Amino acid sequence: MVNLQLKQNYMIPISNKAIITALISILSLPAFAQKTVLPVQTDRWLINPNGSITWTVKDRLPHADHIEMSGEKVSLWVEYGIDTAGVCSINRTVVFPTFRMLPDDTRSHISYTFHDDELPRIYINNRLLSFIASPKRRSGNMAFNVKSFSHKGIMNISAQAGNPAQVKIDRSFFPSVDKPMAIEKFAFTNVTDKPVTVVMEYLKREVTTDTARSKSAPHTIIMKTVDEGSRVIAPGKSATFAVCYLATDHPSLPIPVNIAGEEKARQNRVAEIQAPLQLETPDTILNTEFAFAKIRATESIYKTKGGYMHGPGGLSYYAAIWANDQAEYVSPFFAFSGDRIGNLSAMNCYRMFARYMNPEYKPIPSSIVAEGDTFWNGAGDRGDQAMIAYGASRYALANGNADSAKALWPLITWCLEYSHRKINDKGVVESNSDELEGRFPSGKANLSTNCLYYDALVSAAMLGKQLNQPKAQTDAYSKQVAELRNNIDKYFGANVEGFETYRYYETNDVLRAWICLPLTEGIFTRSKGTIDALFSPRLWTADGLATQAGKETFWDRSTLYALRGVLQAGETDRAMDFLHYYSRRRLLGEHVPYPVEAYPEGNQRHLSAESGLYCRIFTEGLFGMRPTGFNSFDCTPRLPKQWNQMALKNIHAFGKVFDMQISRKDKEKLTVTVTEGDNIHSYTIKDGATLPVKV
């Protein structure tokens, strides 16, 4: 006998034979008749009162994971794990985005990996503290026994040494906010009633890159101890030591390091990111994952010679921008984020792409790399102009700054004209590929490029009016919107595997994840069939949407778009089940704490723009904020039936700072309250209705 656990937590005994019979019955149904049953999740991590998450090491070993943390001049990738014997291992890969090699390309940054056996030796009461596993650990050494891991912008490991314990060890990893340096800090606390002596040996190692291949100058990477030496720690007191990993082109000059100052700066930067745009709902998991996603989306911005450049990360993508990750995904989020550096990176992203406009209407490169010195265009036109126009027009409206919008207008109109020139005889836009760059087929014209172009036209028509552009131009955009909407339905609308939804390209006959895109652009003609397909066993997997039905490959970006789109389509409670499941898996499951890029490609790297897409599920999906002007937006809130209220606090958008609260007035009506300083405006709307809001 086994048990099935239902949502109400009732336990129902059921025989194995009955389960098998039920599964056979379900699987024999056609795809459109099957329903997805979300797996029961077993959390590894828990949420703490201060908003951090903790894994207390007990059983379910071995376990390993990785996390990335970034500053303006460095990114720190930490691989960590515990084996079956309880021994911890750490690998740190430190990336220096602005220290580069030749020739210029996407991955010409330098990076180095440091292992536990390279650490300086540490002695506790004359016994060597051993970080590495047997058989290298010698008898008589003192073991580093890990008790827990925690995350919130800084990775912390809590451990103890000695049996019985002599010292409590708090080991933390974090990047410098503004220097090409990562830090590993050890804080030892005496937990006995006698003095304890702790010694960290002095260590300094240098590596210098090949002069002939180094860009600008040879680069030196230094691993060195900070505050090393001997300390006698009184009972209940603590002492701190550290190791730093840094890059410099001037190794002969003194390199002072203030560990306490660097840690405080990192804490302040994380707090600065988290203070604006705070999500308050009855669901703690959603609130916490939203706060974490803001960290990853915003920290991954590098100060380069070409200005602030948001970068995906993942050990591969630094000091570089892409038309999808930066222009389409994350920059529109920065218009709501209230982060100064985020907004600087957004404007710089669009300005960099604008440099490649040309009178011949040759495509803008997909990616600008190496601090802006060169570009990558290996996949041809991926629909990049539609991506850029979509993101730039939404950003310009939500940012609420007329001068910034004027600077972006030529880029937006150029990209729209480029796409218009690519319209075929069926009235849809053709492109060489899509953002998956040929990993999966996309035909001559794909749904992604056309939906993004459609939404860009919608935004451009509104933006042009704000900028007092000629009426003939904005009217032309509005006319093209109507034509393209009709052509999208004619060209892509189809019955695929029994669902009335969309084919991704003309000859496509297998369900694809990107059928969600019309929903995010306000096209709901085929919403029922599309949502049924998205949440069917053909597409939905344990990790979200499969890129193509029947394949194991998944890319979080399509899941994040889909969850937003289903909310926009009004299937609120259905979307919330999957959103809660996805958020719990990413925040408290086996690979935490951020949305990921893909699998199997990249080993589920925490690429940063995906976290921006996660936040947009709430701003554009749950709260239904669609920019319409420099100080206006349409609000179509989707309050789940089981909630009485929800709020977004400290929104920085449309040139203002305001709060928005949605509360249930009765079964059919909602109250929308917008608070801007001392000005409070409340509106009553029918549940599901759209409210035009001016701030």
Image: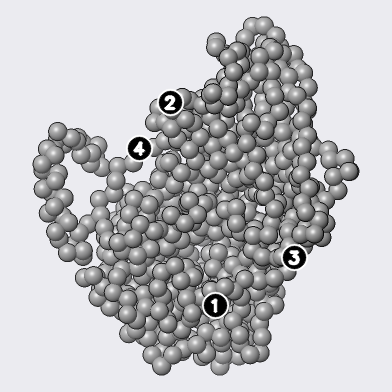
Q: Which mark is residue 58?
A: 2
Element class at badge 2:
loop
Residue 232 position within the rendered picture, expressed as x and y whole percent measured from the top left: 74, 13
Counting from the top left corner in percent of width and height, residue 207 is at 76, 44
Cα–Cα span, label 3 and label 1 = 24 Å
Observer-side mark, 3 or 1, equals: 1
Report crowding for label 1: few under 14, some 14 to 19, many 20 or more residues within 10 A (C-alpha).
some
- The residue that disc 4 covers is 42
Using the image, determine if residue 646 lies above or below residue 138: below
Q: Amino acid at mark 4?
A: Thr
Q: Which residue is mark 1?
A: 380
Q: Between tags 2 and 1, which lies in front?
A: 1
Q: Earlier in the sequence, mark 4 or mark 1?
A: 4
Where on the picture, by quarter, is residue 397? bottom right
Local SS, label 4? loop
Work out whether residue 484 or residue 128 is closer to the camera in this orientation and state it.
128
- At label 4, counting other C-alpha atoms closer than 10 Å, the crowd grade (few under 14, some 14-19, many 20 or more) is few
Badge 4 or badge 3: first in the primary sequence: 4
Q: Earlier in the sequence, mark 3 or mark 1?
A: 3
Q: Earlier in the sequence, mark 2 or mark 3?
A: 2
User: What residue is at 61 percent from the left and 85 percent from the top?
Assistant: 362
Above or below, comparing residue 424 to residue 654 in the picture:
below
Distance of label 2 from label 1 (alpha carbons): 50 Å
